[in-house]
Image: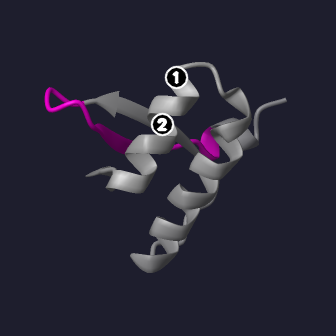
Amino acid sequence: MRWPADDALNALIRRYYRGEAQLWEDIRQQVDDELRRRQIVRGAYHIRLRARPDGGYDVQIDDASGYANEP
């Protein structure tokens, strides 16, 4: 699943990549909120941020449920 980040999330992502690592939890929370708005219930997932040519970012969600059960 993939969608374009809104302006507020794009701003957080830019700051995160400039070195404000503590913002990861805020980014994760915004992604969780968006999944709830879309009524998507997910288990474990990876968040991937993909740069777009226009300077913004896409949020990509990859299933990670297989990793949760590994020893």
Occupied quadrant, residue 14: top left
Between residues 40 and 69, which one lies in front from this camera angle?
Answer: 40
10, above or below 70, in the image: below
| Magenta segment boundaries in residue numbering | 52-66
- On the image, the x and y values in percent for residue 31 come to 51, 57
Q: Tell me if label 1 and label 2 are in contact, CB under 8 Å.
A: yes
Occupied quadrant, residue 55: top left
Image-based side of 36 in relation to 3, left or right: right
Q: Residues within 10 Å of mark 1 (few under 14, many from 20)?
A: few
Question: Which mark is drawn over residue 13?
Answer: 2
- On the image, the x and y values in percent for residue 20 come to 66, 27
Secondary structure of the residue carrying numbered label 1:
helix
Between residues 46 and 23, which one lies in front from this camera angle?
Answer: 23
Q: Find the distance from the CA under tag 1 to the CA under tag 2.
A: 6 Å
Total marks shown come to: 2
Q: Is residue 64 magenta?
A: yes
Residue at image mark 1: 17
- On the image, the x and y values in percent for residue 34 come to 46, 67
Image-based side of 5 in relation to 64, left or right: left
10, above or below 17, in the image: below
- Residue at 52 percent across and 22 percent down: it is 17
Label 1 sits on what residue type? Tyr
